[in-house]
Image (spheres, rainbow, N blue to C red):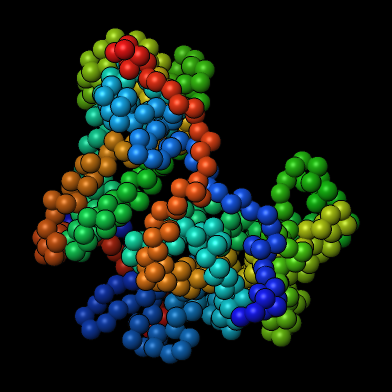
């Protein structure tokens, strides 16, 4: 018996279990999600991109491989290793991801790059001079340029791969794509701030009609194999060195030894 | 793999001079561990409560005896996280699904941290107000009925004389606002400190509700509460 009080009822478009099957965003699963492209279509629906995004499926799928960075020394992946070091795959996977929503780095930061491109593309529409002026105005105000700049190396090797895919897929005339390259050119006049992978993916996906939030979420889906792989191997290894580092690896820079007021009173 | 191969695959991590040690800033490990500089076994364990340890950990300083009692009282007031609330509810579902201790706590703690962070975000105007209190509490912080006023009166009784040191307590706050004002008066003034205290204070109830549920009791759980109304945008 369903309690029909309005406050105890929530709308959902996601899914419904029905007799003999399941519905997913208006699609009967058994009829629509059994082919090779089903996973990526289900992902696009999950992030709210809607069925119209299916026309970009080929591009969405090709971008996935460009983002596979799985080195366990990378901070969120190291965290995954730490949390899985007691043998729990899901604990490692979840710990490595749970903090990403508001993190400065990680796949969801693609949202910030997408928001930046959305904020600047109107100036690009007006012309290169207007774009350069706006970028300079923001630089003087101390703004950051999400998606530009590559840490620890001159260029992001993944960008050239995405450049090639964009050309092959005939997407190089996209508004956001061209804007992202124009921004790089304008910024590089002052100092080296090349596009990084986040910028490139954000530009392509914005041209596909995705919102900045959807861009961030899809970027996260792209790197899930990296988290999963580290969680699986981390749990299998259950490495004592990750459960606890040797004392020689730790230096103490905290308060000096002291005695509490209560202990002083006790003498 | 020979040396040449190693050189050829050297990546950005190898190209940067990273520190070789991890920095400890709070706990000094060892046979007689120290926390914020104090001997845990021969000092803190003899003279201080767990809530003192929490304040010390988060602020770097031990609370005064008055603040210590106030913090303890505030944490007890914060503790009841009923099964109606998402953290305990999440822990119950995890348990029913068969989760062991860690799984119940993981589900509960993630949700609890989200609840605490949401509440602290919501009360950021109050935290700013507490930094330089003027006459009127920020919107949403006032008591709206006598039940809330009774609860705040109960808090005043528990705080004793320390109540006089809690800014905002005399401005007719609701219980949540009054408790956050108390934390502020105890020296816990930053958002991350509030979130931490909320999580620690409420975790016992969340864990207990979770562990009280029976693994596998799917038929005893109200699966259709709340009811989700599927809004179909039919595609076939």
Q: Residue at x 37, y 71 (%)?
A: A236
Report the number of numbered marks.
0
Looking at the picture, does residue A119 appear above or below residue B10? above
Can you give x and y, in whole percent of width and height, for residue B9 in the image? 67, 74
**Which image quadrant for residue A199?**
bottom right
Is A101 situated left or right of B225 in this image? Answer: right
Is A76 situated left or right of A261 in this image? Answer: right
Q: Residue at x 14, y 54 (%)?
A: B213
Is B157 situated left or right of B32 in this image? Answer: left
Q: Is residue A149 visible?
A: yes
Of residues A138 and A187, the one drawn nearer to the viewer in this rendering: A187
Q: Residue at x 50, y 62 (%)?
A: A77
Looking at the picture, does residue A131 appear above or below residue A37? above
Q: Is residue B176 visible?
A: no
Can you give x and y, in whole percent of width and height, for residue B227 in the image? 24, 60
Image quarter of the C terminus of chain A: top left
Q: Residue at x 81, y 42 (%)?
A: A140
Is B182 situated left or right of A134 in this image? Answer: left
**Which image quadrant for residue B230?**
bottom left
Image quarter of the N terminus of chain A: bottom left
Can you give x and y, in whole percent of width and height, for residue B76 in the image? 24, 29
């Amino acid at each position: 018996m369903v309690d029909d009080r309005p406050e105890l009822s929530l709308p959902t478009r996601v899914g419904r279990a029905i007799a003999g099957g399941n519905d997913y965003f208006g699609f009967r699963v058994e009829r629509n999600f059994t082919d090779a492209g089903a996973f990526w279509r289900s992902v696009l629906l999950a992030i709210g991109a809607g069925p119209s995004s299916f026309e970009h499926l080929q591009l969405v799928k090709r971008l996935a491989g460009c983002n596979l960075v799985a080195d366990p020394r990378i901070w969120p992946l190291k965290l995954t290793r730490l949390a899985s070091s007691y043998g729990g795959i899901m604990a490692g996977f979840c710990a490595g991801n749970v903090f990403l929503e508001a993190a400065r780095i990680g796949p969801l930061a693609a949202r910030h790059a997408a928001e930046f491109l959305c904020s600047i593309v109107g100036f690009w529409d007006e012309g290169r001079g207007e774009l350069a002026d706006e970028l300079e105005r923001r630089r003087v105000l101390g703004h950051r340029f999400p998606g530009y700049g590559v840490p620890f190396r001159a260029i992001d090797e993944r960008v050239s791969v995405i450049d090639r895919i964009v050309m092959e897929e005939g997407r190089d005339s996209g508004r956001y794509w061209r804007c992202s390259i124009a921004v790089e050119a304008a910024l590089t006049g002052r100092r080296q701030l090349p596009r990084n992978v986040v910028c490139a993916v954000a530009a392509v996906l914005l041209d596909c009609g995705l919102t900045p939030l959807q861009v961030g979420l899809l970027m996260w889906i792209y790197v899930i194999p990296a988290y999963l792989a580290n969680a699986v191997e981390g749990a299998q290894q259950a490495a004592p060195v990750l459960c606890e580092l040797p004392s020689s690896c730790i230096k103490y820079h905290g308060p000096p030894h002291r005695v509490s007021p209560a202990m002083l009173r006790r003498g | 793999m020979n040396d040449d191969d190693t050189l050829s695959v050297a990546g950005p991590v190898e190209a940067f001079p990273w520190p070789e040690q991890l920095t400890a800033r709070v706990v000094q490990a060892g046979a007689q561990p120290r926390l914020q500089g104090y001997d845990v076994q021969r000092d803190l364990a003899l003279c201080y409560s767990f809530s003192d340890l929490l304040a010390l950990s988060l602020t770097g300083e031990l609370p005064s005896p008055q603040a210590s009692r106030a913090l303890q009282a505030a944490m007890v007031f914060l503790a009841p996280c009923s099964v109606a609330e998402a953290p305990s509810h999440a822990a119950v579902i995890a348990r029913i699904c068969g989760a062991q201790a860690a799984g119940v706590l993981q589900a509960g703690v993630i949700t609890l941290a989200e609840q605490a962070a949401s509440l602290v975000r919501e009360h950021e105007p109050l935290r700013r107000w507490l930094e330089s209190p003027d006459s009127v509490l920020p919107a949403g912080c006032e008591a709206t009925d006598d039940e809330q006023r009774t609860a705040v009166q109960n808090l005043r009784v528990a705080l004793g004389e320390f109540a006089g040191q809690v800014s905002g307590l005399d401005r007719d706050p609701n219980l949540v606002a009054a408790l956050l004002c108390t934390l502020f008066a105890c020296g816990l003034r930053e958002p991350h400190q509030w979130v931490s205290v909320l999580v620690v204070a409420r975790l016992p109830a969340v864990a207990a509700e979770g562990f009280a549920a029976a693994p596998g009791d799917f038929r005893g759980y109200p699966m259709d509460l709340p009811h989700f109304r599927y809004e179909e945008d039919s595609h076939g």
